[in-house]
Amino acid sequence: MNEAVIEKSEKGFVPTLLLAFFLGGLGVHRFFVGKIGTGILQLLTLGGLGIWALIDVVMIIVGSFKDKAGLPIKA
């Protein structure tokens, strides 16, 4: 059998989700996964007035949130 190996980020699902849920308005979850630039933007805009942070929480839950290298967060 030839199974494709899907590479995952070293960052975990639970810590990323908890950071986004509790500190999403400050962009802490983006700093955690290495996205420093967008983390600073979220910090300055308070998570896009909460909307950007909410979208990130949903993206983390459905599994489409990626780290700086473009790898999906491991579950």
Image (cartoon, grey):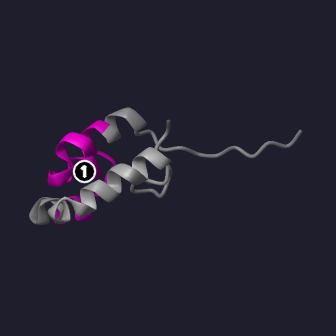
Q: Is residue 1 left or right of residue 39?
A: right
Q: Nearer the viewer, residue 19 or 8?
A: 19
Residue ID at (39%, 56%): 68
**Magenta stretch: includes residue 26:** yes
Residue type at tag 1: Phe
Prevalent SS, magenta region: helix
Residue ID at (25%, 64%): 38
Q: Which residues are magenta?
A: 18-41
Q: Is residue 12 visible?
A: no
At which x and y percent is residue 21?
A: 25, 43
Q: Nearer the viewer, residue 75 or 40?
A: 75
At which x and y percent is residue 51?
A: 24, 62
Q: Is residue 11 left or right of residue 53?
A: right
Q: Is residue 18 above or below residue 67?
A: above
Picture quadrant where residue 23 is located: top left
Residue ID at (49%, 54%): 64
Q: Is residue 65 visible?
A: yes
At which x and y percent is residue 48?
A: 19, 65
Q: Secondary structure at mark 1?
A: helix
Label 1 neighbour load within 10 Å: few <14, some 14-19, many 20+:
some
Residue ID at (32%, 34%): 15
Residue extending furthest right?
A: 1
- The residue under label 1 is 31
Picture quadrant where residue 14 is located: top left
